[in-house]
Amino acid sequence: MRNTIQKKLVYAAVCDLNMHATAEQVFSHVTLTHPTVSKATIYRNLHQLTETGELINIGTFHGAAHYDHNCHKHHHFVCEKCRCVHDVQGDYSNAVLQSLNPSTEFDITDCNVTFTGICKTCEKSTLDRSDARG
């Protein structure tokens, strides 16, 4: 695959945003400096960068795929309130794989773990609001 300027812009945007960006967020970031880049170009290059292993698609949360430039094995936490995606330190894959019953239908070699809940920032703002009322 060619290493085009658009591909470099998309990769740089994911790195600059440093937030498990969606295609829409990458598009907004890239078009700040390169307004002629189309959404189709963003989607195509995100796909190509995941195909080559330069980015990972960590999954679809709240209706949008999220991309990560940290391609080392790690897991994620998705806040149900603010919808932010955070890295989780530690590798829980082995524990999950060991807890599964062996199946004759599958040869499972890996897994991705995503935790959901309320992040500390949202939890604190909820507590602050209830203290203010109280």
Image: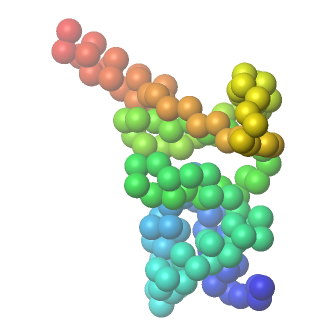
Figure check: 134 above or below 83: above
Figure check: 22 above or below 49: above
Residue visible at 68% across and 58% down?
A: 56
Quarter assignment of residue 127: top left
Quarter assignment of residue 121: top left
**Residue 74 relative to residue 24: left or right:** right
Nearer to us in this view, 36 or 52:
52
Nearer to us in this view, 106 or 111:
106
Image quarter in which the C terminus is found:
top left
**Residue 52 relative to residue 9: left or right:** right
- The location of residue 119, given as percent across then percent down, is 48, 29
**Residue 72 relative to residue 46: left or right:** right
Image quarter in which the N terminus is found:
bottom right
**According to the image, what is the colour scheme of the structure?**
rainbow
- The location of residue 2, given as percent across then percent down, is 77, 88
Residue farthest to the front, as pictured: 104
Residue visible at 47% across and 64% down?
A: 25
| Residue 18 visible in this rendered orientation of the protein | no
| Residue 114 visible in this rendered orientation of the protein | yes
Quarter assignment of residue 5: bottom right
Nearer to us in this view, 129 or 66:
66
